[in-house]
Amino acid sequence: MNAYETARQIAQTLLKGERSIPREIIRQKVRQVIGLLPGLGFSEAIDEDALTRDLEELYNIWIGQPTFLDDEQGHEPWLPQSRADIDWDFWNRYRRYLEEEKGWSPFTVDHLEQLTDSILERLESPKRRGAWDRRGMVVGQVQSGKTSNYTGLVCKAADAGYRLIIVLAGLHSNLRSQTQLRLDEGFLGRDSQLQRRAEDTAGAAIGAGKIPVGKFLLAHSGTSSAENGDFSTKVANQLGLVPGGNDPILMVVKKNKTVLNNLLRWVVSLRGSQDEQSGKKIVRDIPLLVIDDEADNASVNTGQIPLDENGRLLDDQDPTAINGLIRKLLHSFEKSAYVGYTATPFANIFIHPEVRTSQYGDDLFPRHFIINLPAPSNYVGPVQVFGLDPDLTTDLDKADGLDIIRTVNDYQNCFPTGHKKDWVPSYLPATLKEAIRAFILTCAVRIWRGQGSAHNSMLVHVTRFTDVQERVAQMVLDELTALQRRLRYGDGNAPHQVLNEFRKLWEKDYVPTSESIIGTSLLPDASIPGWEDVADLLYQAAARIQVKQINGTARDILEYWENKSGLNVIAVGGDKLSRGLTLEGLSVSYYLRASKMYDTLMQMGRWFGYRPGYLDLCRLYTTNELVKWYRYITIASEELRQEFDYMAKMSSTPEEFGLKVRTHPSGLIITGVNKMRSGVTMQLSFAGSISETYLFSKDDRINQKNLHATEELISNVGVHSRTERDNYIWENVAPDSVVSFLSAYQTHPNARLANTERLLDYIKAQLRQNELTSWTIALISNARAEHHETIAGLDVGLTKRQDAAPDSSTEYRLVKSRLLSPLDEMLDLSVATRREVLELTRERRREDGKPDSNSNTPDGKIVREKRPATRGLLLLYPLDPEAIGSQTPVVGFVISFPGSRNAVSVEYKVNPIYFDQEFDEP
């Protein structure tokens, strides 16, 4: 430990027990510590300002509260009564490791302790008698610290008495090895490779194992962080591992058919006993905990769910291989607990909760609990990187993205979309060459800021083919070598040419970006060096950089752990980087491949996470198309989390939440992506939601037809009941009129969330439940409209909506995919009810930790809660055709459906063509 790290650790000890600490107090402690260093044998000078800034940032992190969905049926509460009787040795050692070695603030560790307690208490006590089985899921953000969370859970589970803990760690060796190494450091406390080679382990202590706790803590590992360190029956037998002893056993395994088969056979043959009732071998009295990292990847059964002619589940299930083996493993234990961890829970929520068979047991739906983890205030996630358009219908606040995205539009000749595996790129795009220079600048500034021993990584992801990656890696190495040579020796007669290139990028890009980010909550305080300071460090920074190709092996953890002085690497990879693998100190990303799979896109976002002291130096080079998709799925993800929190407030169970998402008109588009390849039957319910047209045809014949359908509707319902803000309103309209309008209206074939056929099926189904029997219709007229139109004898001010589609497109697509003006959704409510809605909106914002707002924009969910189940609202928006160069008004509609306890789901089929069109996957 160097002088700076020692000073920080001592300062944290002096500040222990504090929460938000004023800068003056932190600086006082820092000065006190600096004065102590010479007596401890350190002669190096410590930057007082830098250490003060680091500690201030550490002690001013804010973390919100998690939300829970619980089904406590069959659960026996145990942790509060047992806590005092448990020796929390592994946990307390891990806690000290996080504080003393990793530099976590006590407040952050306290929060982790509370979270892991919340998970552990939702499992069963390992001492509970009889058979039990618990299934749950923990949802966090990409790169937000889920590994630290489940390492803490492993420690506590071992302390409480779980004796076999299996961690399912992705599909590839690199992620499995990285996960094993994290658990070696945090839980085992020693290098699992040395144990596996039966070497002298006296000097094998690492991580938490170096924390003096006054006793020897022993946990065995049947796997190691080596390349060949996955589970092997031969090695397990050589080590003499027998589950069920006094010491816990840890297995970190890939989601691999052979590995899981061998593990299952080993443990059942060793400790299984014949069950008289079923005839199969069951492992009794050994509580099993399975932690499934990236639980949405490979673990979910994406095959068809067979049903009989009455729609009932058949017992003859044939799940996908990994899903079946995980279920068999859990089903082979009398006492088991399963906790899935993921940042993209779309597929997990879509698991059918009632699937269970005698051979495989229950499917992996998290039926007992789902926990939504909040991200700390210093987390840099999709909202911070890409921003968030205000979504007034779901109460999502506007958020500006960070100024770190750089557009790439010069790649098609180098890496053409759809290229084959034998493609040979001949040169690097200018933007990739700039990104390499940006990485060198970033490394230089980090050295200047005193972060020279920190890891620095750059990601290059331009193709999924390993042969092409190899060629790209060589070209990147050639470019880097040339820059290293030029920085050291100059360019012959132009010795300053290369410095001028770097200076231009520094002044045009780095200085203004740093000025815009420093001083914000994500980077409260940092210094910007002068150009001469940066120039002096460029060669030193460039000379330390290596180029490595990622190919899925254990060595892809890039030797971060072995390079204590900091590894500086440009990692060239493809799909192997898509999940789990952490690139330490990732600052510059060059990312091209455009998947439209929500979970794949989010998981490929390795640039999310924590960037203490260097956020302003990060850059994401990518395409406009990818930025558009990330912004879109950010809204979708935030809406899903908001829906979760809303259901938690209603004390709903995971099954109720899963059902709602599976039947929600926009939710199913989000969650169905992993299940649409082979074609599935979906269920759809519009209860408590809105359906709006935001995509139209530019064909005048279609728009004339829809305008005529609108005039027919207005003529049939007669004189309007009243006007409000120039809008014409009809009340107590019979549902037949709405049905006739929707039958005559032609929606765009790609406007799937406003498909009139599905809307009609739902309305007719609800009418049979004596719901939606009375309608309010509003014809929206803009009082300040530039153009007017006479519709069914009424003067209507046309609403302006810009066209977001390209000029060459035959589609008219609304900006931000929104037609509704939120206040219009309250047109059918009384004044008193509107006041109540707005007050509840403000109250829920406060509960969610959002700032108070004087806005009169209602939360659409609350509006729909307050509307009786018998009443629907149809809003008609005649749009100004000037946006598409036409003379015929384009009529869009919004239907606001009330909530319903008797909502009927409408069945329809999703086929592979739909999947390919929507998500464009190869």
Image (cartoon, helix red, strand yellow):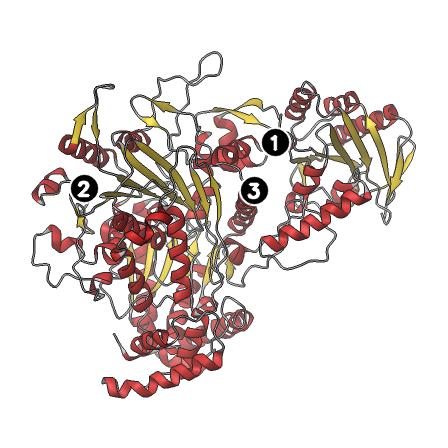
Crowding near the residue tagged with mark 2, few <14, some 14–19, many ≥20 C-alpha atoms within 10 Å: many
Does residue 680 appear in this view?
yes
Secondary structure under the numbered disc 2 in the rendered image:
loop
Q: Position of residue 851 (x, y in %)?
A: 63, 59
Residue 752's disc number: 1
Of discs 1 and 2, which sits in the foreground?
Answer: 2
Q: Earlier in the sequence, mark 3 or mark 1?
A: 3
According to the picture, the residue beneath numbered tag 2 turns out to be 231
Of discs 3 and 1, which sits in the foreground?
Answer: 3
- In depth, the one of 593 and 192 nearer the eye is 192
- In three-dimensional space, the C-alpha distance between marks 3 and 2, rounded to whole angstroms, equals 40 Å
Q: Position of residue 430 (x, y in %)?
A: 45, 61
Crowding near the residue tagged with mark 3, few <14, some 14–19, many ≥20 C-alpha atoms within 10 Å: some
Q: Are marks 3 and 1 in contact (CB under 8 Å)?
A: no
- In three-dimensional space, the C-alpha distance between marks 1 and 2, rounded to whole angstroms, equals 46 Å
- Left or right, 516 with reference to 142: right
Residue 325, placed above or below residue 815:
above
Q: Earlier in the sequence, mark 3 or mark 2?
A: 2
Quarter of the image with the C terminus is top left
Q: Quadrant of residue 725?
A: top right
Residue type pointed to by label 3: Glu
